[in-house]
Image (tube, helix red, strand yellow):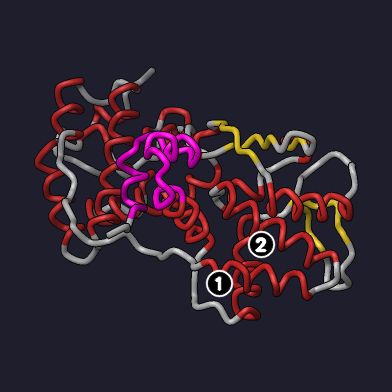
Amino acid sequence: MTNQLATHESNALTIADALPLDQHPAAVYLAGKSKTSQRVLKSDLDTLARLIGAADCLAVNWGAVRYQHAVAIRTALQDDKKPATVNRILSALRGVLKSAWLLGYMAAEDYHKAAAVKGVKSTALPAGRELGSGELRALLATCEADQGNAGARDAAIIAIMYAAGLRRSEVSGLMLADYDQASGRLVVRGKGSKERIAWIANGAGRALADWLAIRGNAPGALFVAINKGDNIQAQKMTSQAVYNILTRRGAAAGVANFSPHDLRRTFVSDLLEAGADIATVAKMAGHANVQTTARYDRRP
């Protein structure tokens, strides 16, 4: 492979001629991520590119980035971004630098030094909140008051998001074949295509059974679109549609503003409050590290 990046001076952080996508560190890095993550990571890499002075991430000579550049980037990011955002962007930087190293555009020593830039420490509480039991009941009551197909579907979505701590992207990705109604076993595909098992029982199981009685046994997405005439469509729902459903039901129920992820926070927090082992909760939530789970814990 011709190393086009090597033709530039070592301190030149931009490139004039675009590399083929299968040879560009940023494109290769993004290609290895899920569709859901690619949009956010592309935005983060473009933010880095603008700090470097390039139009976008494809115009950056990532192989020329060194430790001093990484430190300068970290300092610049801290000026107007929250610590969590800075750390997320720095993670993207480490990822694209690793691709540059693996593609042969930078030496191992240069990569490891640049990737060693430290994250930003913060004592701020994570964003979001937990929903109270009264708020959950109000959301479900609003769905139950809707006697149409959408009411049954939305009740099932809210119930399993809380009962299994699902992300909205995980909800939209569920297939009918992922759920065994007899046992309550649900296969969930999380970030990085990692699979985990959730068990749906009690009220969540009943809500899902009510929806399946309406949906039928046709193969396809577990949750499908419903048009304005309340007719079921053979069309997979998007994660944005899940967001819109929760926003609409929350407004109808008079529940204070919350995000879909807050149902997941409530799932984790309630399990910890009930005395569940944090390692077990981390596995149930699909967290690779218990430290991530610990950030959801807001008990006194």
Relative depth, front residue between 156 and 56: 156
- Look at the numbered disc 1 and give the secondary structure of its residue: helix
Which amino acid does the dot numbered 2 rest on? Ala
Give the percent coordinates (x, y) of residue 48: 28, 51
User: Is residue 145 placed above or below 43 in the rendered structure?
Assistant: below
The quarter of the picture where residue 279 lies is: top left
Foreground residue, 6 or 202? 202
Task: Identify the residue position indicated by label 2 in the image.
Answer: 241
Residue 14 to residue 46: above or below: above
Question: Residues in magenta?
Answer: 271-297
How far across and how far down the image is residue 209, in percent? Answer: 80, 50
* Quadrant of the snapshot with the C terminus: bottom left
Which residue is the site of mark 1? 134
Residue 9 seen in the current view: no
Q: Going 72% across and 54% down the picture, which residue do you hit?
A: 237
User: Of the residues under marks 1 and 2, which one precedes in the sequence?
Assistant: 1
Task: Tell me how many marks there are.
Answer: 2
- The answer to whether residue 175 is magenta is no
Which mark lies nearer to you, 1 or 2? 1
